[in-house]
Image: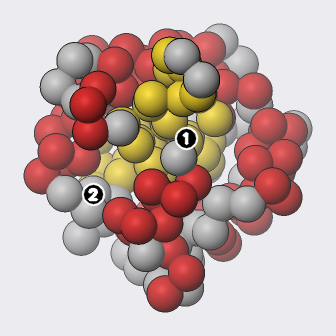
């Protein structure tokens, strides 16, 4: 999945994007266990969702382009109270697309995070029309306001 993310998002060539590695995954796990969620079938994940809980202030800085994904993550310290959540990545293997799996996994993860944080807004930086539609559907199902970075 990390290889698929690199191929699609080209994170190694874009300093604005979060380069997901073991250290980043451990930091996300410390923020909340549901920040990294997956749907596993057979030998591995077929859907992988990455969410970053954040404050409204950090969200506004990110949406305006003043901070990068990496900076957004660093501003999300463990033990903080978050009122927004960033849909950073939703990856689905091609043969499992259009089945509602990413929507289900993302909504379940957001519900788990909302048990601990007063999340009111979902924000995203869509790289595709499919990603934009997914964010809209997740926000609608979860009852969250949706904000996008362009």
Q: Which picture quadrant has residue 68?
A: bottom right
Check the picture and name the quadrant holding the C terminus. bottom left
* Camera-side residue of 28 and 7: 7
Q: Which picture quadrant has residue 115?
A: top right
The residue indicated by pointer 1 is 51
Please give left or right for residue 92 compared with residue 24 in the image.
left
Please give left or right for residue 121 compared with residue 81 in the image.
left
Circles 2 and 1: CB atoms closer than 8 Å: no
Please give left or right for residue 138 compared with residue 30 in the image.
left
Q: In the rendered image of this protein, does residue 44 appear above or below residue 54?
A: above
Q: In the rendered image of this protein, does residue 132 appear above or below residue 73?
A: above
Q: In the rendered image of this protein, does residue 113 appear above or below residue 89?
A: above
The residue indicated by pointer 2 is 126
* Camera-side residue of 103 and 86: 103
**Would you call the spot at circle 2 few (<14 residues within 10 Å), some (14-19), or many (20 or more)?**
some
Q: Which picture quadrant has residue 50?
A: top right
Can residue 113 be seen in this snapshot? yes
Identify the residue at horizontal 53%, vertical 46% (top origin): 1
Identify the residue at horizontal 62%, vertical 69% (top origin): 19
* Camera-side residue of 17 and 74: 17
Secondary structure at numbered mark 2: loop
Identify the residue at horizontal 40%, vertical 43% (top origin): 91
Q: In the rendered image of this protein, does residue 132 appear above or below residue 30?
A: below
Identify the residue at horizontal 49%, vertical 66% (top origin): 6
Q: Residue furthest front?
A: 43
Which of disc 1 and disc 2 is earlier in sequence? Answer: 1
Can residue 119 be seen in this snapshot? no
**Residue 62 in the image, given as x and y percentages of width and height:** 48, 68
The Cα–Cα distance between marks 2 and 1, rounded to whole angstroms, is: 13 Å
């Amino acid at each position: 999945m990390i290889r698929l993310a690199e191929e699609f998002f080209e994170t190694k060539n874009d300093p604005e994007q979060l380069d997901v590695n073991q250290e980043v995954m451990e930091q996300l796990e410390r923020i909340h266990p549901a920040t990294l969620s997956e749907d596993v079938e057979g030998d591995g994940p077929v859907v992988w969702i990455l969410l970053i809980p954040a404050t409204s202030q950090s969200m506004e800085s990110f949406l305006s382009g003043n901070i990068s994904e990496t900076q957004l993550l660093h501003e999300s310290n463990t033990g903080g109270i978050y009122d927004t959540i960033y849909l950073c990545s939703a990856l689905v293997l091609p043969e499992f697309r259009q089945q509602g799996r990413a929507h289900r996994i993302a909504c379940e993860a957001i519900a788990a995070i909302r048990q601990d944080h007063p999340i009111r807004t979902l924000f995203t930086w869509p790289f595709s029309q499919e990603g934009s539609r997914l964010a809209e559907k997740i926000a609608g199902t979860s009852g969250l306001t949706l904000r996008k970075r362009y």
